[in-house]
Image (tube, rainbow, N blue to C red):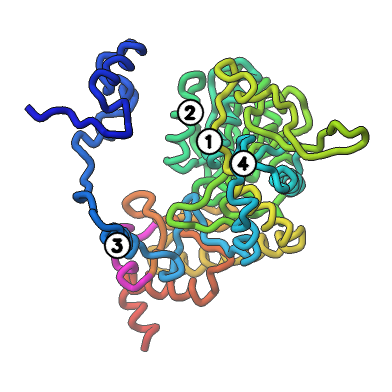
Amino acid sequence: MTAPFVHPYIPNTAPESRAAMLAAVGAETVDEFYADVPEALRLGRPLDLPAPFVAEQDLARHVRGLLAKNRSTQERLSFLGAGTYNHYVPAVVDEVIGRSEFLTAYAGEPYEDHGRFQALFQYQSLMAELLEMDVVNVPTYDGYQATATGLAMAGRLTGRPRVLVASDVLPAKTSKVHDYIRAHLTLDHLPTVNGTADVAAVRAALGDDVAAVWVETPSATGAVEAALREIADAAHAAGAVLVVGTDPIGYGVLAPPALAGADIVTGDIQSLGLHQWFGGAHGGFIAVHDDPRFVMEMPSRLFGLATTDVPGEYGFGDVAYDRTSFAHREEGKEWVGTAAALWGIAAGVYLSLMGPAGMAELGEVLLASTRYAQQSLSALPGVTLDDDAVHLREFTVTLPVPAAEVVSALRAQGIEPGVVVDEHRLLVCVTELTSQSDIDRLASALAAVVAPELAEEQNR
């Protein structure tokens, strides 16, 4: 029998130490800690790792080989979206967040400030102006967690157990939100109509057990919700909270959810000056009105103007710190860990560079490019748009051939045509970096797959 491996620097690998720790928590084996993880998600075998490298140069060569397998959207024509987007990042954004005083823009207090609190205060202020809200938090992990927290806040405020999901939501986001709130809230998914919420279905499902109505706009398919005011009025009449998950990129031209009655607005700031970086730099925001009931339910940090020990002098620091788990520890309403503060600084630089006019121009370009792409693809034989809603950046099409075949065929030409939704549906995304000629190239390549005769005639 092989003796158990004991690491020289990791004490809990020693059998006696591990046994003592298990006894202290009342567990028989380490496997008990993973009871909530479905068997299908467990590896069931050791990691497939190479033998240890003796020399540093050998390890460096191995890692370079792994990285060389990646293909970025700088190398390929990409129409991929679904939560991580290829927007332009101004050079000054990278310059600022690369500065040494911001590289440790974490959450805790051990680090010297060097303007970090002020930079995040400015980010919060810019986001509040963009969203027409009063209070915005320091970024959390990502937009998924921010939306989950927004729903948890609604549950605490109302004391009710049910959430109505009125929009199409990305499956990954639904999974993350469910995992976060499942101990206290249940998700009740309602049907959508023509890409957006079915207001009649929302009204019919509302009751005194509903904590919140959750609306995504743009939705998972890029549809912009047109009936937000009606949904807000219905939710409020039933004593429920309206929680909106969104992407702030379009609010230079679109009316922010707060103006239509949203109580809690959440989302991700990846679109605001953050690269895709093979999965994206993500940070979540939570925005509320200046209402103490809502503000005091926000678990994450807020930076604001604060008095100092010098009379008449102000600085930037934590606001209502006693809300947080940092203050209450295990007695806190909701645990908050590592913040994505550096990404908040990046988004703040981006918004300050763009300004209201820049955000408006960007929104107009996104709407126009999305519509041009919809018209170009739906003009192909057998290709249809899935709804008539207004779309921002993303939309779905139904194809006459399997979507996976389209992806394989176009990928061979250096084009990523979109994300497969189901057998015949494709989610297509455009940004300000997608030119008209890029869209035309996609349409031409798609025509060669779905209508080869037409493509051949056009190429004559």
Query: Residue at position x 48%, y 73% from top?
Result: 438
Which amino acid lies under the numbered mark 4 shown in the image of this protein? Pro
Residue assigned mark 3: 57
Q: Earlier in the sequence, mark 3 or mark 1?
A: 3
Q: In this view, does 355 lie above or below 317?
A: below
Q: Which of marks 2 and 3 is nearer the N terminus?
A: 3
Residue assigned mark 4: 139
Dot 3 crowding, Cα within 10 Å, few <14, some 14–19, many 20+: few
Q: Which of marks 3 and 1 is in front?
A: 3
Quadrant of the drawing holding the N terminus? top left
Mark 4 vs 2: CB contact within 8 A: no
Determine whether the residue tagged by mark 2 lies in a helix, strand or loop.
helix
Which amino acid lies under the numbered mark 1 shown in the image of this protein? Gln
Number of marks in picture: 4
Determine whether the residue tagged by mark 3 lies in a helix, strand or loop.
helix
Residue range corresponding to the magenta coloring: 398-414
CA distance separating discs 4 and 1? 10 Å
Name the mark on residue 145: 1
Q: Earlier in the sequence, mark 4 or mark 1?
A: 4
Query: Residue at position x 36%, y 71% from top?
Result: 414
Mark 2 vs 3: CB contact within 8 A: no
Nearer the observer, 312 or 81: 312
Quarter of image, res 338: top right
Name the mark on residue 180: 2
Quadrant of the drawing holding the C terminus? bottom left
CA distance separating discs 3 and 1? 39 Å
Mark 2 vs 1: CB contact within 8 A: yes
Determine whether the residue tagged by mark 4 lies in a helix, strand or loop.
loop
**x and y percent of residue 32 in the render?**
29, 19
Q: Which of marks 3 and 4 is nearer the N terminus?
A: 3
Q: Is residue 176 above or below residue 366?
A: above
Q: Which of marks 2 and 3 is in front?
A: 3
